Image (cartoon, rainbow, N blue to C red):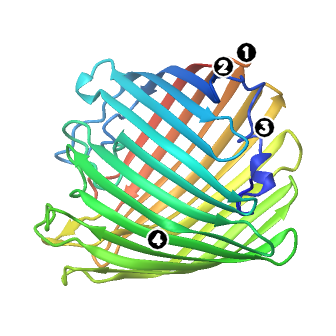
Amino acid sequence: MGAPKEATTARSESVLRRPLADTPYGYDVGSFIFHAQAEAGIEYDDNILRSNSFPGNPAPVGDFIGRVAPQATLQSNWDQHAIGISLGSEFDFYLNNPSQNYINYNGGINGRYDIDEEQQITGVLQYYRQVLPRGTPGVGVTGGQSFTNVLSADVKYLYTGEPFYLRIGPKYEYRTFEGSAPSANFNYFGFSARVGYRVTEDFSVFIDPSLQIYRYPGGVDFTGFDPNSQGFDFKVGVTYDLGSDVGLEAAVGYFQQWYQNGAVPPSGGLSANLALYWNPTEDWSFEVSGGRSLSQYRIVTGGIPNGNAIVTQIQARVGWLPTYNLLVDAGAGFSIYEFQDVSQNTNYYGGDVGARYFFNENYWIGPRYFYTTSTATNPSLPYIDNRIMLTVGARL
């Protein structure tokens, strides 16, 4: 049962995405297959609070961080229909700053109902608790960690006929915050679709309309203003698939978001998505992705909340497979958060380089180095951060 022709063959054949070494079969549990893996690592971060020398900020602090991350999945092995369950967690321990210790965890269930060879209904129910990374919009440099808790449900109807294909359905999300969080709890109601037409075997065109509604059960947020909003995004795009060598998806459109609070002007402008996959040889792969959209972050200037940030971002990554069990890869990217009407921007730039080596199908090791820097019109926000880590893992 295939999905709409959106994920190109070049994407699945990228050395950055296809399995390294031989993938373990797992364990049969009735008509299901059980997989499990665990990673453990040590990291040194030279600026754990993402701070700078601005008056009132804490001095930059470095620390060693230990990390353990187990995961498990149970996936059906049926000829028709499918269901899967996943569980995972991450435990981070700071050597000299135990107040920064945290635990992430997640769980979910996904399913697929096959109507016939061209029609499917898919669904995902998921919950996760995740630390909000230091230095990101709305997350401060003092105090303890901040977390978001997210419960989401996503249902889609898929039609994979020729020459038309369709993906359409609703999504619901309830998000709560703990600690020095950037905003109050909210409900998200969304509805999105893709309607595509295959012009040739390799080339198709599509439209992506969507609606977004945000509702805050508290009535007013931490600023004392009503943050409820609603809006739309409409994009048109193309996909190009040249076998396992080149895959491209690009879309451009317009978004608009209106706010219940009259002090907050509407947000609107260009929206875009880009994904490019290129495999010049079996051992080399290049990927570029990016986009422009509205993000649910808010800041306050002069006592008036300014709606959300318009985010523009792009990332590039290269992978090299010198042997079947060793991947060397590097990436770089930037993102720009524009808070309209208050003349405040925050920009992030960074990159990483690393490797993953499989001793056999069950065990691997991988070093990695990350560099991140930010600039901002608010002088208390910019920072520079370096991280180096070593991770070992096992899977079955």
Q: Residues within 10 Å of mark 4 (few under 14, many from 20)?
A: some
| N-terminal-most mark, 1 or 4 | 4
**Mark pair 2, 1: CA separation:** 6 Å
Say which residue label 1 marks: 359
Considering the image in quadrants, where does the C terminus appear?
A: top right
Give left or right: position of 276 versus 127.
right
- Residue 118 image-quadrant placement: bottom right
- Residue corresponding to mark 2: 364
Q: Which one is earlier in the sequence, the residue at label 4 or at label 3? A: 4
The amino acid type, in three-letter code, at marker 3 is Trp
Q: Are marks 2 and 1 in contact (CB under 8 Å)?
A: yes
Q: Which residue is mark 3?
A: 320
Q: Which amino acid, mark 4?
A: Phe
Q: Secondary structure at mark 1?
A: loop
Front disc: 1 or 4: 4
Question: Is 211 in front, or is 292?
Answer: 211
The kind of residue on which mark 2 rests is: Trp
Please identify the residue farthest to the left as the structure is shown: 224
**Alpha-carbon distance for marks 4 and 2?**
41 Å
- Callout 3: helix, strand or loop? strand
